[in-house]
Amino acid sequence: MQFGLSEEQILLQDNVNRFLDDNTPLDRVRTYAEGGEDADIWAGLTELGVPALLIPEEHGGIGLQPLDAAIVAESLGAHIAPTPFLGSAVIAPTALIAAAGDHGDLLAAIAAGTHRVGIAFGEAVAARNDAGIRVNDGLVNGTSMYAFDAEADSYLVADHNRHLYLVQADDPGLTRTHLVTVDKTRRNVELNYDNVAAQTISTDPEVFAAALDVGRLALAADTLGAAQNMLDQAVEYAKQRKQFNRPIASFQAVKHMCAEMAAQLEPCRSMVWFAGHALAELPDEARVTACHAKAHLAEVGQFIAKTATEVHGGMGFTDLVGLHYWFKRIGANRQWLGAPEFVREEAAVLQGI
Amino acid sequence: MDLSFGPEYDDFRAEVVNFLDQNADKAPKGNDLRGNAAKDWQKLLIEKGYTCRTIPKEYGGYGAEPDIVKSRIIAEEFSSARVNAGLGGQGISMLVPTLLEMGTQEQKEQFIRPTIHGDMVWCQGYSEPGAGSDLASLTTSAVLDGDEWVINGQKIWTSTAHIADWIFCLVRSEPDAPKHKGISFLLFDMKTPGIEVRPLVDMTGVANFNETFFTDVRVPKHQIVGERGEGWQVANAILGHERETLAPANTAQTRINALIELMKQESVNGDALINNPVYRDRLMKLQGKVMAMRFNELRILSARLNPGQNPGLARMITKLEGTELRHDLEGLAIDVMGELGLAYDDNPHLRNSGSWQREYMYFLGLIIGGGTSQIQKNIISERGLGMPREPKIEKAS
C-alpha cells in the first residue's frame, strides 16, 4: 500500500514548477492580465509535454492519468499561470478519447500544441437565462457564455442533452466576444453562433460526464495549488512584518489564522490525490469523489483566499502585492463547471440520496 | 499509488468480519469498565488478537508483531459493525504503552495483565486547577521522606477516579529544577490514606470527571516510572499518540451514514428531511469533509508503511479538525430533528438512544480536552509553519 505521488509524478511536478518559476513570475502574469498573450507559456509547457499528458502514445501523447493532470494543475494554480490547460489538455482529450469514432488527428494536434481546444459547457452544467443554444441538422445557433479560452482554435460545445459538438473558431457564423471577469489570469469569451457547423463528437451523456469529472478534478487541484501558495505567502509576510516591535507572526491572533488555513488545506491534498486515483482505478467512487473534491476545495479555497489576504493587512488589498490574482483565480475556480451547491447536490443524487 | 493491502490482509479482514457476525451478540453495550460482560468480552477479544494485540503474551496480551494495517482493519470493522471494541480507559490506552516503553520489568509484570483484563482500573492525575494547557507548571508536590514519597496537592479532570483502583500521577519532585525537569511519574493505590475524590458532573450529566485531593499521601519510593525529574518525558512518550486517535475518520464515516438514515426516517409535515435542500446541502458539505479526513488518514498510514514518504502536516491537524468535524456532524443531526433533537435520558421520543446530543456535547469536551483547539493551533503554527512563539512575559517582581 502506498498512498502518495510516485517518483515519476514528483519529477513531473518539479519540472513544471521549475519552468513556471522561471517563466510565469507575477510580472509575467500581469503582462497577460493587461492584454498580453500566453502563447509562449503554452509553447514552453508543450515542450514539457503538458498538452500531451492524457493523450495516448499512439497519437503522440504520453498516456498518463487524471492524477498526473491534477498535479500539473496544482502547479499551474500555485503560479496562477495563464494557459488553456483546462480545456485543451484535460477536458477535450478526455472527451475525445472516451467518444466513439476516430479523433486521432485532432488528439495529435492537441498533443503537439498546434491546436487549442476550448470548452463551452455552461448549457449542460448550469444553463443561465442570458444564454442558450440549439443544435439542428448539424448547425448550432444561440449563445454560450463564459466559454474558455479566448484564443482557442476550436470549441467543444455541450448542449442541454449533454451531447458534445466541435465548432471551429474561424467559422464565419461564429462571433467571439471577450467577457471581462475578475480573474485576469484566464480569459473567458461569449460565443454567438449563427448557423455554425457542428461536428458531432458524442451523443452519449457519459462521455460528457467523464470529461466533466476530470475537469472538476483539475479545478480542485488548481485551487489546491493557489491556496497553498496564498498560505505560504501569508506565513512569510507575517514573519517579516513587524508591529509593536515584534513580527506579527508571533501574535496568536495571526498564528491561529494561519494554523486554521493549514489545518483545512492539508486534507485537501490527500483528497485531490484520491480523487485523481479514483478516476482511473475506482469507478464506483470516482464521480462522487470528484464532485466532493471540487466542492470542498471551493469552500476551503474561499476561506484561505479571504484569510491569507487578511493576514497581509492593507497590503493584501492592494495591487502592489498582487495577492488578488490568486484570490480571484480561486474565486473563478469555485464557479467554473458548477458552483459547490450544485456539485454537492449531484454528489447526493449519485449516491441515491 | 497503490491502495491494496494484498491478499493476506483481505483474508484477515474476512476473518474479522466473520468473527463479528458470529459473536457480536456477546458484546456489552455501553462503556462499563467494571461489569463481568465487559471482562468476558475483553478476554475473548484478547484471545483472538482484536485488542491488546501487540502486548506481549507474558503480560497477558496477544503478543503479535506490530502491524498497523491489521490494527486499522480491526478498528474499521468494529466501527462499521458498531460493536464494542474492548475495554478502554486511560490505564489501557495510556499507562500500558507507557510501561511497555519506560517501565521496569517488575512494573510490567505487576500491572499490565490485570489492567488489560479489566481487573485493575486506572485514572490519570495530570491536570490541576492551575495547570491546564500549561501542564508543566503543575504544583502537586512529592517530597521524599525515608523510603516514601509524601504527596500533597490537587488534581482535576481525573476521569474515573471514583472507580479507579490505582492512579498514574505527575508530581513536582524537584521544586528547584526548571519546570519541565522537576516532574516525576508515580503510581499509587487509590485506597492510600489521604486521598479524597469529589465527582465533577459534566454538561452531558455524567460524573466521569473528578477533583482529586492529596493530603500527606505516602507512596513507596520505588513506585516511580523512569527516574526522578523525568516524568515529563515519560508522560510525553505517548501523549501525541493520544491526540491523533481521539476522533478517527472511520467513526466519523459511520456517524455520517447513521445521519443519512436518520434524515431519511425523520420528517416534517410528511416530507423526509433528506429531501429538504438546506439540510441536504449541510449534510453533503460534512460528507465532503469526512471524506477529506479519511484520505488524510490514508496519507498518515502510508507514511508509516513507507519510510521516506513525508506526511506533511497530516498528523498534526487530525485532533483539531477531527474533533471539530464530529461536533458539527452531531450538531447537524440535532438541527435535523428540531425539538425532537432536544430529547435526552429517558425521553420516549429519543432517537439512536440519545447519542446525537450526547456526542455533540462529548465532542465539545474533546475539543477542549487532550490539548485545546487553541493549543493545537499553536502547535500547528509553531512546529508546522515555523512561526515564532509568543514572547515570554517578564515576571512581575
Image: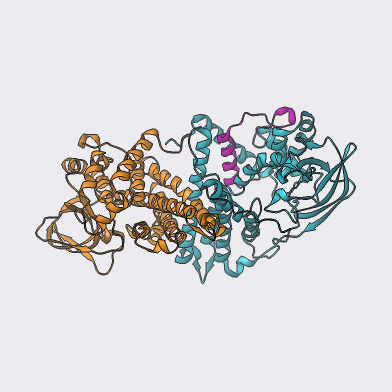
Which chain is displayed in cyan in the rendered image?
A: B
Q: As rendered, which of A195 and A42 lies closer to the eye? A: A42
The shade of chain A is orange
Q: Residue at x 21, y 57 (%)?
A: A150
Quadrant of res A64? top left
| A144 falls in the magenta region | no
- Measured as percent of width and height from the top left, residue B271 is found at 49, 68
- Magenta-tinted stretch: B56-81
Q: How would you classify the magenta stretch by its main secondary structure?
A: helix
x and y, in percent, of residue B321 in the image: 55, 52
The residue sitting at 52% across, 40% down in the picture is B300
Q: Is residue A264 left or right of residue A126?
A: right
Q: In this view of the protein, which residue sits in the foreground, B233 or A12?
A: B233
Image point (52%, 29%), residue name? B8
Residue B138 shows in this picture: yes
- Rendered location of residue B287, percent (x, y): 48, 54
Q: Is A157 left or right of B269, judged from the image as shown? A: left
